[in-house]
Amino acid sequence: MVTIIAAIAENNALGKDNQLIWYLPADLKRFKKTTLNHVVIMGRKTYESLGKPLPKRTNIIITRDKNYKAEGCIVVNSIAEALKVAEKEDENPFILGGAEIYNQVMPATDRLDITFVHHKFEADVFFPEIDKTIWKEISREDFKADDKNKYDYSFVTFERI
């Protein structure tokens, strides 16, 4: 099972200038708990925005640059190669983005694990539309903004129909 995990805004915004636009500690905590001890697959820009490998996870970076190196990570040159490497180690790898990777891997994805941030943001990268004829919502938890989380948000899981 391949799972895309992402936090997206009401206007499908993902980020701006290779950075997250918002800070939601609850989402970061959930992200860590969900992906811990799994393979995580991401594009080079996403990896560079993180600045280092995510601990206690196998980090696979996809880049077209055949000479790219990242200490503590596996570097591959295609999504197909990333998925092939991942399946040897994990039955449920997570795709972390960015936008280009999400668009390319969507047809091979079985589950979407989405944090919806209930706010619109100015952005330069966006998540692809979630086609409700292909995806069925199987779980949802809604939360109000609080002293730690500035925006209302929802944790929603979709599975391919």
Image: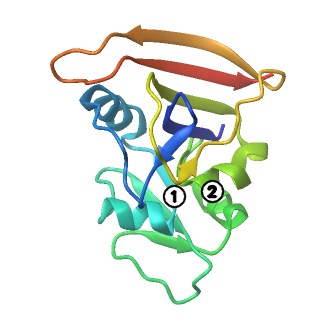
Label 1: state its secondary structure.
Answer: strand
For disc 2, the marked residue is 101
Count of numbered circles in the view? 2
Say which amino acid is labelled 1: Met
Residue 26 vs residue 13, the one in the foreground: 13
Residue 141 image position (x, y, % from top left): 45, 10
Q: Are there few (<14), some (14-19), or many (20+) residues within 10 Å of tag 1?
A: many
Residue 134 x/y as whole percent: 81, 26
Quadrant of res 1: top right
Label 2, secondary structure: give it. helix
The image's mark for residue 80 is: none
Q: 83 or 5: nearer the eye?
A: 5
Is 69 drawn above or below residue 15 in the view shown? below
Residue extending farthest left: 147
Q: Residue furthest front?
A: 122
Vertical placement of residue 72 versus 40, above or below: below
Q: How is the image coloured?
A: rainbow
CB contact under 8 Å: marks 2 and 1 = yes
Q: Is residue 14 left or right of residue 47?
A: right
Identity, as a three-letter code, of the amino acid under mark 2? Ile
Q: Residue at x 79, y 44 (%)?
A: 107
Residue for point 48% across, 51% down:
40
How far across and down, in percent of the image, does residue 111 sit?
65, 31
Q: Is residue 28 left or right of residue 124?
A: left
Residue shown at 43% from the left, 82% from the top:
69
Of all residues, the one furthest to the right in this rendering is 133
Q: Which residue is mark 1?
A: 42
Q: Quadrant of the C terminus?
A: top right
Say which of 80 and 23 sits in front.
23
Alpha carbon distance from label 2 to label 1: 7 Å
Of labels 2 and 1, earlier in sequence is 1
